[in-house]
Amino acid sequence: VVLDLRNLDFLDCSGLHSFVSAEKRLRSAGGRLLMVPGSAQIQRLFEVTYVDSFFEYVEPQEILF
């Protein structure tokens, strides 16, 4: 699953929790959650909550469909 955060304007802790839960479910089912990084403000939320290293980030051109 690829989650593209580039057009995301707002993210709070409940949204962040949803991303973490989805990643855990995918990983336990043998899948992967890849994220295209969002704005500096969105990425900062990942950093200050210490979950930035929990996710695998890719650039849009790296995605193969």
Image (spheres, rainbow, N blue to C red):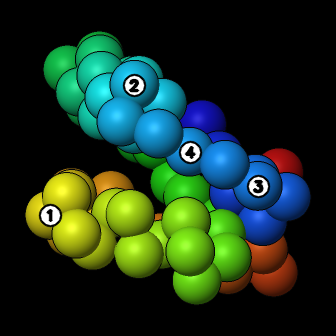
Q: Label 1 neighbourhood size at 10 Å, few (<14), some (14-19), many (20+)?
A: few
Give whichever of discs 4 and 1 has the lower sequence position. 4
Q: Quadrant of residue 6?
A: bottom right
Q: Quadrant of residue 54?
A: bottom left
| Mark 4 or 1, closer to the camera | 4
Tell me the distance, in whole angstroms, between the alpha carbons under discs 3 and 2. 15 Å
Name the image quarter holding the N terminus: top right
| Residue 14, numbered label | 2
* Residue 10 rendering spot, x and y as whole percentages: 66, 49
Tell me the distance, in whole angstroms, between the alpha carbons under discs 4 and 1. 15 Å
Between 42 and 34, the residue placed more toward the observer is: 42
Circles 4 and 1: CB atoms closer than 8 Å: no
Tell me the distance, in whole angstroms, between the alpha carbons under discs 2 and 4. 8 Å
Q: Which residue is mark 4?
A: 11
Q: What's the amino acid at mark 4?
A: Leu
Position of 6 relative to 19 (above/below): below
Q: What's the amino acid at mark 1?
A: Tyr
The residue positioned 32% from the left and 28% from the top of the image is 17
Tell me the distance, in whole angstroms, between the alpha carbons under discs 3 and 1. 20 Å
Q: Which residue is mark 1?
A: 50
| Residue 9, numbered label | 3
